[in-house]
């Protein structure tokens, strides 16, 4: 899937991936997509909750080689 911006949150622990994601999303226009790569295992739950609470759409969540990839569409 195509994305407009990418955020590398590898090596960061909660709450930093979410805080950096919030900042990155604020720099995008409505409808644009942010791709986030994280290594914190808790990020899966965190990003699901973040999407619910903020109204942004979690388009995709996947894991490969202990890295988690999230695609979020800004509301």
Image (cartoon, rainbow, N blue to C red):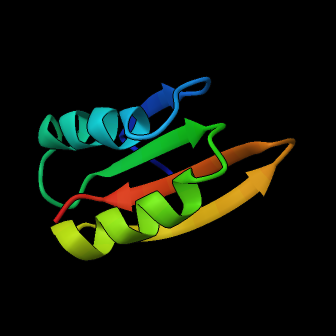
Q: Is residue 10 above or below residue 2?
A: above
Residue in view at x 14 percent, y 34 percent: 27
Can the viewer see residue 2 in this picture?
Answer: yes
Residue in view at x 58 percent, y 38 percent: 37
Residue in view at x 58 percent, y 53 percent: 42
Q: Is residue 63 above or below residue 53?
A: above
Left of 6 or right of it: where is 60?
right
Left of 63 or right of it: where is 54?
left
Quarter of the figure with the C terminus? bottom left
Q: Is residue 15 above or below residue 1?
A: above
Across and down, in percent, residue 25 comes to 22, 43
Name the image quarter holding residue 44: bottom right
Q: Say how many tags the image has.
A: 0
Across and down, in percent, residue 40 comes to 62, 41
Can the viewer see residue 1 in this picture?
Answer: no
Residue in view at x 59 percent, y 38 percent: 38
Name the image quarter holding residue 14: top left
Q: Is residue 60 above or below residue 6?
A: below
Across and down, in percent, residue 46 comes to 44, 59
Across and down, in percent, residue 66 comes to 81, 42
The answer to which of 68 and 74 lies nearer the viewer is 68
The answer to which of 51 and 33 lies nearer the viewer is 51
Quick one: which residue is furthest to the right in this view?
Answer: 65
Quarter of the figure with the N terminus? bottom right
The answer to which of 42 and 27 lies nearer the viewer is 42
């Amino acid at each position: 899937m195509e994305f407009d911006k990418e955020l590398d949150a590898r090596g960061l622990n909660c709450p930093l991936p979410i805080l950096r994601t919030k900042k990155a999303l604020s720099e995008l226009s409505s409808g644009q997509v942010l791709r986030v790569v994280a290594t914190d295992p808790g990020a899966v739950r965190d990003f699901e909750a973040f999407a619910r609470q903020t109204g942004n759409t979690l388009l995709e969540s996947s894991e490969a080689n202990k890295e988690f990839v999230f695609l979020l569409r800004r509301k």
